[in-house]
Image (cartoon, rainbow, N blue to C red):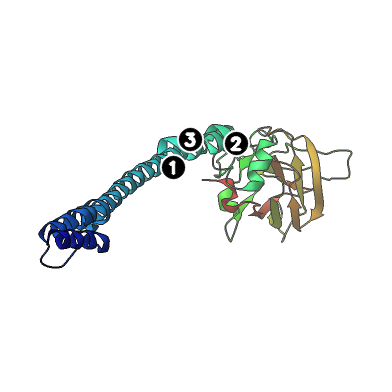
Amino acid sequence: MRAVKFAAVLLCAAIGGCAVGVDEPVRSAARDSGGGDSAIEEGSTPDVASDDSGSAAEGAVDATIDGAADSTIGADTAVADTAVADTAVADTAVADTAVADTAVADTAVADTTPVDTGTADTGVVVDTSVDAGSCAVRGCATGTENRSGCANARTIGRVPASTGTGYRISDNLCSASNKFDESGSACWDANADHAYRIWLQAGDIIDLVLTTASPCSSSGFSWNGTLKIIENSGCDVTACSTLAFCAYNKTSHAKSYTAPRDGWYVVTVEGSSAFDDEGDYTFSVKLTCKTAGCGCP
């Protein structure tokens, strides 16, 4: 029997264990297979899943940290590139561009300085001529001078002369004196006279009309008059320097004249000869200015 049992044990050992009836070999086989131990330590899903999910968690943490770091850097870059103090102020601040390029001291003074007179300095043409050395506008209003000679020539205002009807006066030479005499020239002006003056800008046009009526000392319908235009040089010169136009020995004169330069121009109404050429007259001046408002306030 012992020999049989021993042979059975050997057989069980050879085939990996016996199902029943062999106590020791079964226990020994269970220990040798170690299924429970090997499964848990080497291939258990909970163990591996735990390790792997831990890695995933670490990856998530890394991604969050990296993202925060990157977005922070983005914010830094934006501030550095577009901050007011960095770009906008330096490039477009008033102190940087506007003042330096267009300040009064830079441009406006040169064109509109008081030397030019603000009133005259209202257009490109006026700006340019004034800056080039021409004159500020004078003589905007009519004066009350007594018309005796060049020094007392009555001012014809630019403003009234430029209206629709222009400047117009009816008077006579019966009490006037002979202050102008172009003796020896082709201009006859041997009798009494009245002097008027008007300030013109270069390019201004005056249309003059003189009509004589009854003479002073005799009955009649008219007398022969002389109409003259005298030029000056300089902004304020009122002397009678250069004879620019003379028409004489007629009862009616009409003349359109364009000023060649800025300054005062004297216009005289005179008797042509010493033989009763004095009397009533009507004289008108129509001014056409080259600038709006004739440069007057």
Q: Earlier in the sequence, mark 1 or mark 3?
A: 1
Q: Left or right: where does residue 27 sit relative to residue 38?
A: left
Task: Return the x and y of residue 221 as percentages of the image width and height.
Answer: 71, 61
Give, as a three-letter code, the residue at label 1: Thr
In this view, the residue in front, 77 or 64, is 64
Q: Left or right: where does residue 54 sit relative to residue 28?
A: right
- Residue at 89 percent across and 38 percent down: it is 184
> Of circles 2 and 1, which is in front?
1
Alpha carbon of mark 2 to alpha carbon of mark 3: how far? 36 Å
Split into 4 quadrants, where in the image is the N terminus? bottom left
Label 3 CA crowd tier, 10 Å (few <14, some 14–19, many 20+):
few
Q: Which residue, given by chain and number where applicable, does mark 1 sit on?
A: 82
Q: Is residue 176 among what the camera can see?
A: no
Say which element carries label 1. Answer: helix
Q: Which residue, given by chain and number where applicable, does mark 2 sit on?
A: 116
Q: Which residue, given by chain and number where applicable, does mark 3 sit on?
A: 90
